[in-house]
Image: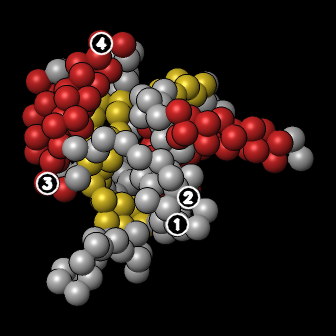
Amino acid sequence: TTTGITYDDSEENAKALLTLLSIESYRFTKPSGQAYIFCGKTNFSWLKDTMEAAGWLVFQWPIVWTKRETGQNNQPERWPSAAYESILFARKPDAKLILQGRPDWMQCDIVLPSVRIHQAEKPVTLLKELIARTSEPGHILVDPFMGSGAIIEAACEMKLIASGCELSIEAYAGAVRRMKEWKERSKV
């Protein structure tokens, strides 16, 4: 990792956390609640089933984030580079989309490794597009695995009430720094 932050991203750990997230998020969200979860392509079906078992209504296909011409690959001499990520979209029965008719894909460059706070950091522009599809100013956004805090920044820019949690002390400190810097920039 170029960020110095490490975390247990094993399949066993991830599935345990996502099972708990599926159940508890359904319990504490409003009847109009909605969720986006970035997930590996191979785990989409499992996560869809897990979310549905908890009560969520899940879009049958992933929303696809295309990273343009960039991709990630640990063995470029053997395999094509992965240039997209899957996003699961779930909602509760009373939820409505704010921006209707948007496609099930988005195109946005990655956060460059040289400026990345967290290795799984998503671009603020991508997160703002997702938020705009489902939320309006004053809505509540919760990120239980906030990593770099990018979605908290995006939510604050869009005037949502945002909060997040992070197990990694290093990542949490990075998110706090990010929001202090954002607060200073937004004073101008």
Q: Which residue occupies 42% across, 34% down?
A: 145
Distance, label 1 to label 3, CA atoms, is 25 Å
Proximity of marks 2 and 1: CB atoms separated by less than 8 Å: yes
Q: Tell me the mark number nearer the camera, choosing from 3 and 2.
A: 2
The front one of 18 and 52 is 18
**Which residue does the numbered mark 3 point to in the structure image?**
42
**Which residue does the numbered mark 2 point to in the structure image?**
116
The local secondary structure at tag 3 comes to helix
Q: Which residue occupies 16% across, 47% down?
A: 44
Q: Tell me the mark number nearer the camera, choosing from 1 and 3.
A: 1
**Which residue does the numbered mark 1 point to in the structure image?**
113
Residue 167 drawn at (x, y percent): 44, 29
Which mark is first along the chain, 4 or 2? 4
Distance, label 2 to label 1, CA atoms, is 5 Å
- Which image quadrant is residue 180 in? top right
Distance, label 1 to label 4, CA atoms, is 36 Å
Tag 2: residue type?
A: Arg
The vertical placement of 80 against 118, above or below, is: below
The local secondary structure at tag 2 comes to loop
